[in-house]
Amino acid sequence: MDSIGADRASGLPEETYRAQLDDLRKKNDELFARRDRVRDGWGEKYRERVHAKGKRTTWERVELLHDPGTSVWPIGTLVNDGLEFGPDKRTSPGAGVVTAFVRVEGRWTVVIANDNTVASGSWWPQTPEKIQRAQEIALRLRLPVIYLVDCSGLFLPEQATTFPGRTGAGAIFRMNSLLSDAGVPQIAGVHGDCIAGGGYMPIISDVVYMTEQAYMVIAGAALIKGAKSMHLTSLSIGGPDVHVHLSRCADHRVPDDETLVERVRAEVGKLPSSAVDYYRYGTDPAPPSYAATELDGLLPPDHRVAYDPYQILARLVDHSLFWELWPARGAEMICGVGRVNGLYAGFIINNPRLTEHPVEAGSKRPGGILYRDGIAKISQFSRACNDDGIPIVWLQDISGFDIGVEAERQGLLGYGSSLIYTNSTNTVPMFTVLLRKASGAGYYAMAGLPYRPVLQLATPVTRLAVMEGRTLAIGAFRTKLDDEFRIVAETPEEEAKIRAGMQRVEERITGDMDPFAAASRRDVDEVVAPSELRGWIEVAVTMSYQSIGYRRIKNPRIWSLHDLAALD
């Protein structure tokens, strides 16, 4: 591997770095404020209600769960952000459920925990999909799943969007079954309400704990009273007396939340230990040689401004060492292998700078676009990483495919199809980061969410769309424009109407491209600050190597990549 990157002052004026840093920090501040609002749930009043029942809030349970000195890495934080439901305009911060990567007893786990400060942990629109996404990640990486259940079932006023569809609440239990079938450990702790769908979720788990306040019921006492005129309590119907000692739907009873979390930690401690040390092959983990925090100032917020992609990579890989493959071909794309936390990972990143035209001597062409050689290069690299068992990190900053006469004659449709086929059939873990632009079919070809990366991250300056708002407005009003894209109108009033229409289209598309809107729709799993990327990639790559026996991982002596590099 070769050393890459340089001190940030190299090639970047200090005033430019400071200006970009200030701009990014403002956007990061908005991101952090949104995260804080989600974590606050429905506020102090509802936290006091939980405490008055002698229970802990969901986040307090998660804080007890993770290993001391480690961080919790939430995913899907901004699902439903900005949305309101019903005539009283209720919000559902984080869709009323916490999903996160949490290290427990030295092992990475996926935690799924109902937020009991939001409508008693009810399931809102997109709650089932958020839960299933976390289960899908756990299944892909064979990570243990921990359910911390405190759920009063569907939020019934919105049941039409959460109950019947293919990804409705019932699909959660299908995922429970698939996880069990794949041998993925599932551990459930029932802390309180566990009604209807909430009651089904923990049942397929390998081990189920209940506190003395917990109950699991198909229907709660209120419904039974109405249907059968019986005076009961939910605790008497389905509390630990029933389910631990009679029905055997649960395994153990514990006095309180603290004890339950302690017992869940002990259950995780019984599982096989992580394989991470084995797959480091004797190498110690190390930070990059250059601070990852500098990424906030190295990534220009203006998507039209280019930057040095090696400076980005140098702040993501251990010791800032990188083995680049085929650097002389398809320079608009950079691919190679680095270590993250001592573990091998493949990296593919767009080069947004001007690059030399491969045929026309002395001419340059724009970066951030997929041309023939670059497509072929990253397609072959992706195949080889899959063959060698190396996780792939895709770093997107792409405007799309090349277009025009030359592109069609070179068969870019065919080359693009090859890349799409490769990424559709890969089984190795792939992680996608949308650094800035994620546009057109290029977003698809570089392992965008439709191609099932294990995780897709965005930054506060990500722009996810087919095309820019201005370009789309021109296309939508093309019949009203001349060849120079000037408005053709017979009267000033008609011209003003067309201009206003174009402006509305541009503003709507620009709003749709917003990364927070994308996260609210679940088009990205999480929005993260550029300075947080090293930490996220470290967690992702580490989780990829934790479990053994479910995918092939070659040792570096027999990599296909070495053969391809030798034949270049």
Image (cartoon, grey):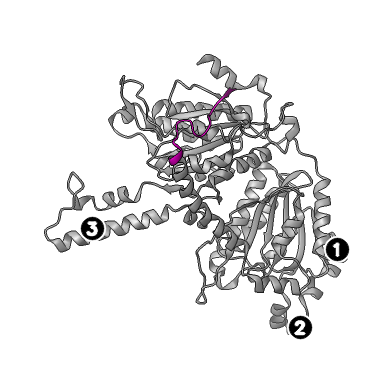
25 with respect to 479 (left or right): right
Badge 3: how crowded within 10 Å, few (<14), some, or many (20+)?
A: some
- Which callout, 3 or 1, points to the residue nearer the camera? 3
Which of the 4 image quarters holds residue 408?
A: top left
Mark earlier in primary sequence (2, 1): 2
Q: CA distance from mark 2 to mark 3?
A: 67 Å
Q: Please name the amino acid that badge 3 sits on.
A: Arg
Q: Residue furthest front?
A: 15
| Disc marking residue 499 | 3
Main SS, magenta region, reads loop
> Mark 3: which secondary structure?
helix
Q: Which mark is residue 254?
A: 1
Q: Earlier in the sequence, mark 2 or mark 3?
A: 2
Would residue 202 appear left or right of 458 to someone viewing this image? right
The spot of residue 452 in percent (x, y) is: 55, 43
- Quadrant for residue 341, please give it: top right
**Quadrant holding the N terminus:** top right
Secondary structure of the residue carrying tag 2 is loop
Q: Which residues are magenta?
A: 1-15
Left or right of 338 in this view: 23: left
Single out the mark in the foreground, 2 or 3: 3
Q: Which residue shows up at 36% across the image and 46% down it?
A: 467
Q: Residue furthest top?
A: 567
> Label 1's element?
strand
Q: Amino acid under label 1?
A: Val
Q: Earlier in the sequence, mark 3 or mark 1?
A: 1
Can you identify the residue that label 2 sits on? 230
Q: Is residue 19 above or below residue 166?
A: above
Task: Answer left or right for 556 relative to 269.
Answer: left
What type is the residue that disc 2 sits on? Met
How far is mark 3 from mark 1, CA to CA? Answer: 67 Å
